[in-house]
Amino acid sequence: MSENIRVVDSPKHFMILDAVSRGVEDSGKIAKVTKIGKEEIEMILNDLAVQRLVITEKKKGLFSSKLQARITDTGTRLLSSKKQELEEKAREFKAMYRNGDKGGMESFMGDNRAWLPMMIFSGIMSAMIFASMMSFMGMAMNPGEQAAAGDAANADAPSAAETQSVADDGGSADAGADSSGADSSSFDAGGGDFGGDFEF
C-alpha cells in the first residue's frame, strides 16, 4: 500500500470492512447488519476503496444501482490486526469488570467507547456482557451502542451462519428469515434486518 494513503482509524470503517470480509458485499445489506445509513456506507466504501482495502463495483439493477465491495488482502490483514488489538482491550475491560474496578472501567470507557459497537458487531464482546457492564457502571448506552447491541436478552440472536445467509441471498423476499423455525419477529421480511446482537 502506498505511503501517501492514510488509513482511517474509524470504528464505522472497520465495522463495514468486517461486514464485507464476511461476504456481506451489497451496500443495502451492509446497512442492515451494521445499522449505519446506506448513504454513509457508500461514502465509507468509497473511502475504503481509495485506501485499497476493498474493491468496489457499481451494479445496475432494474430500478436502482447498488454499490458492492470485496475485501482485499491488505484489508484482511488490517482488519485482523485491529481485531487483535480490540480483543486485548476487551480482555482488559472484562478483567476490570470481574475485579469490580468501576473507576478503571469508567476510564476505559472514556478512552475506548467509540470502539464498543465494533467490538459487539465483531463478536469480540457479547452484547449481554456489555449491557451488564454498563449497568454496573450506572451508564446508559448511546444510540450507536444500542443499535449494535440490539436486544441483549434476545435468545434468538442471529448467528454467523445467518449473517452469511444474508451475504449469499440473491434478493428474495424472505432474505434473512430464520430457517430454524424459531421466532423471527425481529427480522424484516424485505431483506434480512438483524434485530439482535452479533455474538459469534
Image (cartoon, rainbow, N blue to C red):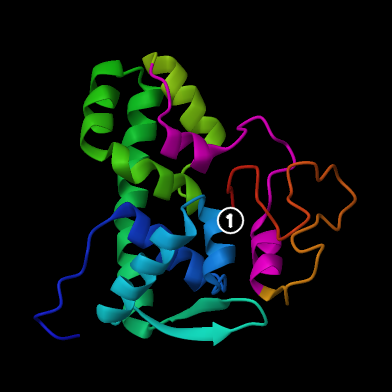
Name the residue at the right extreme.
Answer: 181
Q: In terms of depth relative to the viewer, which is nearer, 189 or 51?
A: 189
Q: Amino acid at mark 1?
A: Lys
Drawn side of residue 30 relative to residue 177, left or right: left
Which residue is labeled 1 in the image?
32
Query: What span is in magenta?
Result: 139-167
Give the camera-side residue of 132 and 36: 36
Q: Position of residue 1 (x, y in %)?
A: 20, 85
Q: Quadrant of residue 174?
A: bottom right
Taking the magenta stretch, the answer to whether it contains residue 143 is: yes
**In this picture, is 156 found above or below 28?**
above
Q: Is residue 154 above or below residue 46?
A: above
Residue 79 in the image: above or below residue 84: below
Image point (31%, 60%), residue name: 82
What residue is at 68 percent from the left and 51 percent from the top?
A: 158
Q: Is residue 48 magenta?
A: no
Image coordinates for residue 6, horizontal then vertical, percent: 15, 71
| Residue drawn where x is 38% and y is 75% of the image | 76
Q: Secondary structure at mark 1?
A: helix
Q: Is residue 14 above or below residue 63?
A: above
Residue at far left of view: 4
Point out residue 121 in the picture as x, y percentages from the top left corner.
Answer: 49, 50
Left/right of residue 123 with respect to residue 196 in the rendered view: left
